[in-house]
Amino acid sequence: MYQEITPMGFGIAIERGKTLFKDKSEFQDVEIFESRAFGNVLTLDGLMMTTEKDEFFYHEMISHIPLIAHKNPENILVIGGGDGGTVREVLKHKSVKSIEMCEIDGMVIEASKKFLPTISCGLDDSKVKIYVEDAIEFIKDKKNRYDVVLIDSTDPMGPGEGLFTEEFYTNVKNSLKEGGIVVPQSESPVANVTEMGKMYKLLKKVFKNVAPYCGPIPTYPGGYWSWAFCSDDVEVPHCHKKVDKERAAEIAKLCKLYNPRTQTSAFDVPNFVKEIAGVE
C-alpha cells in the first residue's frame, strides 16, 4: 500500500502493485509502480507526482489557461515537468514553434519515457529541446526569450527549494517577451496553506498582476490544487469577452477537462483561497 500523509495528519492511500522502476538519482528517490486504481504512478522522495489516470487534471490546467490567455504563444519554457505531461499539452497549440524544458533530474525523464509513455509522448517531438540542468542557473542569462513560462516544479523542498525565491522569479520575469505570462503551480489551499501564502507574497513582489486559479486533482494532497497566473502586461482573464473562444474551443476538443468556460471559471476561486493568496 502506498501512503502519503501530510503534516496536517491526513493524506491518500493507493493499493500498489508491481514496482516498475526504483532508483536514487543525485537529487531524489525516483519510483514508478503499478496500481489498479490509477495505472502507473510516479513518486519522488515518496511524494505523489503523477498517475496515468488523473494526470490530465494537472497538466491541462497548468498549460492551457496561460497559453489561451496569451495572444500568440510561440516560444515556451517548461521548468521541471520531467514526466512530460506539460510539454504534451503545450504541443496541442498550433501557434507554438518551440518548447524548451529545463529539468534538473535526467532520471525522471528517462524513467517517464519508459514507464509513462502516454504522459511523456511529446518529449521526442522536433519542437522540443530538453536541458538537464538547474533552472536557477539556466534562467539567469535568458532575456526577452519566451512568451509563456510554466513552472511545473515539486514542492519547496529538496531540488525544488531554490525555485521559490524572489531572485529566481525576477530572472523568470526578465526572460519574458512583451505580453509574457508565467504560471507556477502554487500548492494546495487545503494542505499547504502556509506555503501557498508565502508564495503569493513573493510573486506579488515581482509581478504586477498575480491571481490564483484552482482545480481538482484526485491524488494530490487535499484533492484541490492551485496555480498562479502572473504577468506585468496581461490582465487576469476573468472576463469571458477577453477569451479567444475559437482557440479555446479547438483545444477543448483535445482535452478531458479543459473547455472554454474553464478559462474564466477557474479564476472564480472560493473566499478562503483569496484570503490565503492575499487577493480580492
Image (cartoon, rainbow, N blue to C red):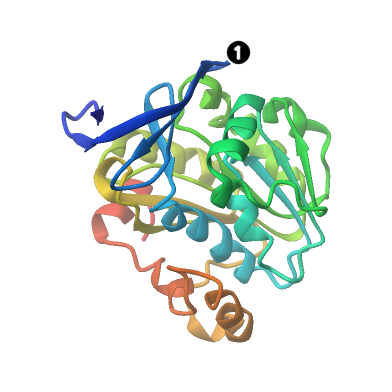
Residue 5 picture location, percent across and down: 23, 28
Outermost residue toward the left? 9
- Relative to 49, 182 lies left or right: right
User: 125 or 79: which is nearer to us?
Assistant: 125
User: 137 or 154: which is nearer to us?
Assistant: 154
The residue type indicated by label 1 comes to Glu
- Relative to 16, 175 lies left or right: right
Q: Can you identify the residue that label 1 sits on? A: 26
- Relative to 229, 101 lies left or right: right
User: 249 or 277: which is nearer to us?
Assistant: 249
Q: Residues within 10 Å of mark 1 (few under 14, many from 20)?
A: few
Outermost residue toward the front? 18
Q: Quadrant of the N terminus?
A: top left
Residue 106 picture location, percent across and down: 66, 27
Q: Quadrant of the C terminus?
A: bottom left
Q: Residue at x 67, y 63 (%)?
A: 233
Q: Residue at x 36, y 50 (%)?
A: 225
Query: Eyeballing the image, is 208 above or below 51?
Result: below
Query: Eyeballing the image, is 98 above or below 25?
Result: below
Residue 202 picture location, percent across and down: 50, 38
Q: Is residue 5 visible?
A: no
Q: Is residue 176 visible?
A: yes
Residue 14 picture location, percent across and down: 25, 37
Q: Residue at x 61, y 69 (%)?
A: 69
Query: Eyeballing the image, is 189 above or below 72?
Result: above
Q: Secondary structure at mark 1?
A: loop
Res 84 quadrant in image: top right
Q: Residue at x 33, y 63 (%)?
A: 269
